[in-house]
Image (cartoon, rainbow, N blue to C red):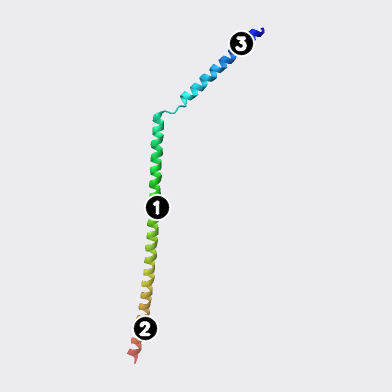
Amino acid sequence: MNRTEFVIATAIILFVAFTVGWFTCWLVHRLSRVSTSDVAELDEMSKALHDAEETRDKAINYLQHRKAELTNQLAQTEAELRAAMDGLRNARHEAEDLRGYIDRIDRE
């Protein structure tokens, strides 16, 4: 093989490698290309996700507000219960005192 044949063979090999590389690149881009319908679907999905996140945030805020209201209401109810129990305790004590007084009067 002389020098000219070697150069021609090398040129053919390089051209074939270039052609195979170019075809592979074209094929990869052709297969991995995103269509406009896919982009539209992704846009719809992102909008739905954004709306869902807003709804979730509103629900969390509502639940926190409702929890605070219920906690406050529970505290008020417990305070009223304590006041009622104290009043009942005082009434029982007073009733016992009155019974004792009546018993002492009856003995006399």
Q: Amino acid at mark 1?
A: Asn
Separation of marks 2 and 3 at Cα, in angstroms: 124 Å
Q: Nearer the viewer, mark 2 or mark 1?
A: 1
In the image, is 107 to the left or to the right of 33?
left
Task: Give the residue at x 60% y 13%.
Answer: 11
Q: Give the residue number, with chain letter if any, for mark 2.
A: 97
Q: Residues within 10 Å of mark 1 (few under 14, many from 20)?
A: few
Q: Secondary structure at mark 2?
A: helix
Task: Give the residue at x 39% y 44%.
Answer: 52
Q: Nearer the viewer, mark 2 or mark 3?
A: 3
Q: Are marks 3 and 1 in contact (CB under 8 Å)?
A: no
Q: Give the residue number, with chain letter if any, for mark 3.
A: 9
Task: Give the residue at x 34% y 90%.
Answer: 107
82 relative to 7, above or below: below
Separation of marks 3 and 1 at Cα, in angstroms: 75 Å
The picture places residue 33, in percent across and down from the top left corner, at 45, 27
Q: Earlier in the sequence, mark 2 or mark 1?
A: 1
